[in-house]
C-alpha cells in the first residue's frame, strides 16, 4: 500500500507531459499540460532552455492567463537568455477540466504550482534553477506555496511584481492611498469630479471591508492610476487584440474561465487571506518590483514583505512611471532589472 502514492505521482508526471516536445535549445517552443485534481493546465516553455534558468510566471486574476506575459519585448529580451514558463492556472487561460469549484482554494493553487515545478524538473533536469515570479493575485499563490513545508527549497528566488500577500492589509492600503491621493489631487484642482467620487466613497467605507467594498476599492484603484499623466498607460484589451491572432489566443476558453473564476467562492477566501505572519519562513532571495502609482496593490505590501521575510538577500525596485503593471508599463526597465537579478543568482 505504501507504494500507491508514489505510483500515482509517477502516473501524474508521465501523463502530464509529452516527452516528444522536450526542447533543449536557445529557441525552445514547448506546449504541454499538467493534469492535477480535476484540472488540465496548459504550460508553455519558450526561449533558452539550455541556460538552465527558468522564469516561471504566476499570473494574476483569479482567472487571468499567462499569454499576456508572452509579449514581443519579453520574447526579445528575456527568452533569448532564459527559458520563460507560461503557466495557465486552473480555471484560467487555456486550461481545461470541469468547473472544480470545490477545489478552488489557495492551498490547491499552491499544490498545482508545486506540481508544475516538479514537472519542469522532470522534463528539463533536476539541476535547473526556477525563478518564481508572481504578479498581482500571483503574489498570493506564490506566498501560499513558499510558506508551505519546504517548498521554497524547490526554487532559486521569489520575484514578486505588484503582488498581494495579505488581502486585509491590501484593502486598507488601497483605501488610504486613494483617500490621500484624492484629497491632494482635489486641492490641485485635478480631475475633481472623479476624485471627489472616490474620496467620498472612502470616507463612507473606512474599515472591515466586505467583498463588495474590496472589489469597489480595486476598481477605483484601477481608475486612479489612469488619472496621473506621468503613468505609462497599459491597455489590457489592446494587448489582447494585438496578440490574439498572432499567438492564437483561446479566446472562448479564456473568457469562460475568467467569468467563472471572477464569481467563484475563492474570492471570499481571498478576502481574508493573510500570509504576513508566515513571511518569516521565507529565506530565499527576494526581489520586489513595484509601481509607484499602484493603487490596486500599494507599495506598503512590499514594505511588509521586506520587514517580515528572513532572507538576507532582498530588495525593492521601484518603477516611477507605473501603476499595477510595471511588467508592461516599463518593460525595458523590467527586463533589465530582472536579468540583472537572475545573473547575480546563477
Image (spheres, rainbow, N blue to C red):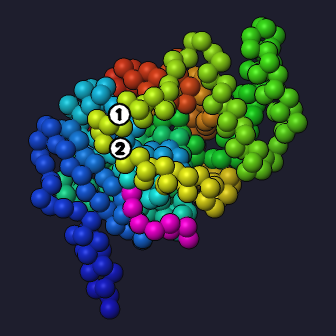
At horizontal 67% and vertical 38% (from top left) the residue drawn is 218
Residue 237 in the image, given as x and y percentages of width and height = 48, 32
| Crowd tier of the residue under label 2, counting other residues whose Cα lies within 10 Å: few below 14, some 14–19, many 20 or above | some
Q: Which residue position holds label 1?
A: 243
Give the magenta part as a residue range: 95-102
Residue 221 in the image: above or below residue 64: above
Residue that carries the numbered disc 2 in the rendered image: 249
Marks 1/2: CA–CA distance: 7 Å
> Mark 1: few, some, or many residues within 10 Å (few <14, many ≥20)?
some
Confirm whether the magenta stretch covers residue 125: no
From this view, report whether residue 156 is shown above or below residue 302.
below
Q: Position of residue 45 (x, y in %)?
A: 25, 46
Q: Nearer the viewer, residue 4 or 154?
A: 4
In-image side of 125 versus 110 (left or right): left
Tell me, yes or no, whether the two marked residues, 1 and 2, touch with CB atoms within 8 Å.
yes
Q: Which mark is residue 344?
A: none
266 relative to 78 in the view: left or right? right
Amino acid at each position: 500500500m505504501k507504494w500507491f502514492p508514489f505510483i500515482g505521482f509517477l502516473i501524474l508526471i508521465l501523463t502530464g507531459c509529452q516527452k516528444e516536445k522536450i526542447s533543449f535549445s536557445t529557441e525552445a517552443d514547448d506546449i504541454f499540460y499538467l493534469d492535477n485534481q480535476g484540472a488540465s493546465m496548459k504550460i508553455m516553455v519558450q526561449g533558452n532552455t539550455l541556460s538552465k534558468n527558468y522564469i516561471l510566471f504566476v499570473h494574476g486574476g483569479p482567472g487571468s492567463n499567462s499569454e499576456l506575459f508572452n509579449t514581443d519585448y519579453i520574447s526579445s529580451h528575456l527568452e533569448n537568455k532564459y527559458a520563460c514558463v507560461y503557466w495557465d492556472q486552473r480555471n484560467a487561460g487555456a486550461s481545461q477540466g470541469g468547473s472544480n469549484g470545490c477545489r478552488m482554494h489557495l492551498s490547491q493553487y499552491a499544490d498545482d504550482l508545486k506540481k508544475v515545478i516538479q514537472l519542469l524538473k522532470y522534463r528539463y533536469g533536476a539541476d535547473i534553477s526556477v525563478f518564481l515570479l508572481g504578479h498581482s493575485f500571483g503574489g498570493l499563490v506564490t506566498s501560499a506555496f513558499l510558506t508551505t513545508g519546504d517548498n521554497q527549497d524547490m526554487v532559486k528566488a521569489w520575484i514578486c511584481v505588484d503582488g498581494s500577500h495579505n488581502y486585509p492589509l491590501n484593502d486598507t492600503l488601497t483605501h488610504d492611498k486613494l483617500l490621500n491621493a484624492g484629497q491632494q489631487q482635489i486641492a490641485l484642482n485635478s480631475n475633481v469630479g472623479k476624485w471627489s467620487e472616490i474620496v467620498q466613497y472612502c470616507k463612507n467605507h473606512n474599515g472591515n471591508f466586505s467583498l463588495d467594498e474590496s472589489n469597489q476599492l480595486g476598481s477605483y484603484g484601477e481608475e486612479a492610476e489612469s488619472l496621473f499623466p506621468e503613468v505609462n498607460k497599459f491597455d489590457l484589451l489592446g494587448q489582447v487584440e494585438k496578440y490574439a491572432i498572432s499567438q492564437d489566443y483561446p479566446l472562448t476558453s479564456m473568457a469562460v474561465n475568467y467569468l467563472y473564476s471572477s464569481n467563484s467562492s475563492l474570492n471570499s477566501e481571498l478576502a481574508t487571506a493573510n500570509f504576513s505572519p508566515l513571511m518569516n519562513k521565507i529565506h530565499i532571495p527576494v526581489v520586489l518590483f513595484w509601481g509607484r502609482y499602484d493603487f490596486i496593490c500599494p507599495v506598503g505590501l512590499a514594505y511588509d514583505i521586506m520587514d517580515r521575510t528572513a532572507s538576507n538577500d532582498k530588495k525593492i525596485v521601484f518603477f516611477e512611471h507605473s501603476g499595477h503593471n510595471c511588467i508592461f508599463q516599463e518593460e525595458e526597465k523590467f527586463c533589465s532589472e530582472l536579468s540583472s537579478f537572475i545573473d547575480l543568482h546563477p
